[in-house]
Amino acid sequence: MSSHTGGTDVLVLGGAGVDTIIHVPELPLPYADSYMIDSGIRTRAGQTGDFVALGLAALGLRTHHLDLLGDDPEGDLVRALHREHGIALTALPQPAGTRRAVNLVGPDGRRLSLYDTSRARPGDRFPPELLRTLAGASRHVHVTITQPCAEALPVLAATGIPLSTDLHDWDGENPYHEPFAHAADVVFLSAAALKDPERTMRRIAERGRAEAVVATAGADGAYLLAGGELTRVPAAVPPAPVVDSNGAGDAFAAAFLYGRLNGEPPVTCARYGAVAGAYACTVPASRAEAVGRDALLKQPATQR
């Protein structure tokens, strides 16, 4: 996998937390006094950083996750997820509590997420020396856009370690996302809120240092900008019925990074991402499971 011995392949920064999953009859959900949820209401560990770490570990990459966690039942769920999957976790204390969200999932697998922003404080920081130490022991750092990762960007950039980030459903305008977009060597985002994906992608490449920009478009596949050339990457065929799109973008990012760290060209990395994303859509949100290396590599979509 790597000539880099005794260290970490990917350090994942931020994005640890707990989701409560509720399958609803339709989205948007019409107002009613009450709904009966026959499928159950489930709370489980797994937000964007957790899912990227899980995807990387499932593909055999040595993964270390750094974030702030509360001393609460939700934090215990996150710690247990990492123990179960053998993912190294450095959890700094978060007095405001562990990050959490509620995901409403429609019958077609689409989701609406409600994020509890009270689980952070303006002064939250990662200690710079700890960041330098963990990044210096890694081949790559994936930075989520959760607070306090923005303050970590200058420290990480100074290390010279390659960075990636996921801007999620950025509209191309919100200034919060720009430092992440411009600091990363690989930028992932969803095309969901973009009127002109290519324009936004090229602007990211022009203003920052990105060697590859990927905009995922669900069942329509993805756009890849690399070497100044825009490529349409078709969606992979899901190996089972689609039940939930939650975590598909994180799975895509993890598989893309697997390809990149193995020296594959960007288009192959994006095909890996498409296969992993399609697989993630077949996994119910109540389960934490990612595509393995054997399943990824045998898919026709990954053949060059």
Image (tube, rainbow, N blue to C red):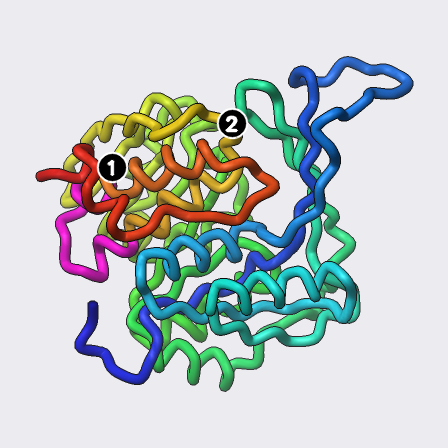
Q: Residue furthest right?
A: 33
- Asked if 98 appears above or below 103 in the picture, the reply is below
Mark 2 and mark 1 in contact (Cβ < 8 Å)?
no
- Asked if 15 appears above or below 242 in the picture, the reply is below
Name the residue type under label 1. Answer: Leu
Q: Residue at x 67, y 27 (%)?
A: 23
Between label 1 and label 2, give the one nearer the viewer: 2
Residue 44 among magenta residues? no
Q: Badge 2 local density, few (<14 within 10 Å), some, or many (20+)?
A: some
Which quarter of the rendered picture does the C terminus lie within? top left
The residue at which mark 1 appears reads as 224
Which quarter of the rendered picture does the N terminus lie within? bottom left
Residue 67: % across, % down = 58, 68
- Asked if 33 appears above or below 132 in the picture, the reply is above
Q: Residue at x 70, y 28 (%)?
A: 39
Q: Residue at x 53, y 72 (%)?
A: 89
Quarter of the figure with residue 22: top right
What span is in magenta?
A: 257-270
Name the residue type under label 2. Answer: Val
Q: Distance between the Cα atoms at labels 1 and 2?
A: 26 Å
Locate residue 63 relative to residue 18 in the image: left or right.
Answer: left
Relative depth, front residue between 294 and 229: 294
Quarter of the figure with residue 155: bottom left
Q: Residue at x 51, y 27 (%)?
A: 243
Say how many tags the image has: 2
Relative depth, front residue between 28 and 59: 59
Q: Badge 1 local density, few (<14 within 10 Å), some, or many (20+)?
A: many
Q: Which label belongs to residue 243?
A: 2
Residue 254: % across, % down = 36, 52
**N-terminal of the two: label 1 or label 2?**
1
